[in-house]
Image: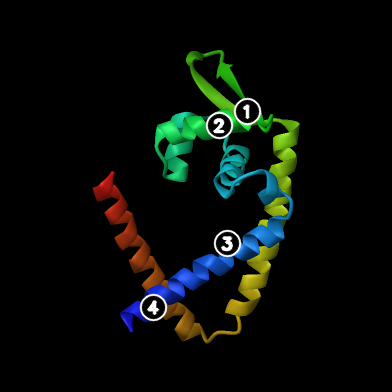
Amino acid sequence: MNEKILYEFTRLYNYQDILSKLMNGNLNLNYSLTEIHCVEVIGQEVQINGTKLAQIMNITRGAASKITKRLMGYKLVEGYRHPENKKEVYFKLTDKGMDIYKQHEIAHKAWEERDIHFLETIDLNERKIVLSFLTSFNSYLEQLIQEES
């Protein structure tokens, strides 16, 4: 049974990935999912630097640096320095980056509406059990990540 649960998680992840690619359309042809999520985080945050970006995305600062350099090369993101802190580089979306951000948000809302509609067909007690399980499992995985870091 445990193997079957893990197998179903893998299927869930794969199906979500396929649907994300289908719903994001051309975004996934040009940019990786990580790059799109980086654009999303930068679009949501005010005065975000590489350290904060890495923390939010749960990646290393080096990985955040590489991604932002690629996004700057694509002209989706630009770096700037705050007048009060000329040492730190902050990031903001360009007009092109804002277009990608908006496209991703539209796809995300459609995904959310689709899945909420399905979840509402499931008995409330069953949803509570699933939520409890997922919360516990995510806490377990988060602990493992912290131990490995």
Other-residue count near label 2 (Cα within 10 Å), few / some / many at <14 / 14–19 / ≥20 = many
The amino acid on which the numbered mark 3 sits, given as a three-letter code, is: Asp
In the picture as drawn, the residue positioned furthest to the left comes out as 147
Query: Does residue 22 sit above or below 5 in this rendering?
Result: above
Task: Give x and y (percent) for residue 56.
Answer: 46, 43
* Lower position in the chain sequence, tag 2 or tag 3: 3
Q: CA distance from mark 3 to mark 4?
A: 18 Å
Callouts 4 and 1 close, C-beta under 8 Å: no
Other-residue count near label 1 (Cα within 10 Å), few / some / many at <14 / 14–19 / ≥20 = some
Is 69 placed left or right of 64 in the picture?
Answer: right
The amino acid on which the numbered mark 4 sits, given as a three-letter code, is: Ile
The amino acid on which the numbered mark 1 sits, given as a three-letter code, is: Met
* Lower position in the chain sequence, tag 3 or tag 4: 4
Please tell me which residue is depicted at 33% across the width and 59% down the height of the picture: 141
Please tell me which residue is depicted at 61% across the width and 40% down the height of the picture: 39
Residue 72's disc number: 1
Which residue has dot 4 on it? 5
What is the quadrant of residue 35 in the picture? top right
Which residue has dot 2 on it? 68
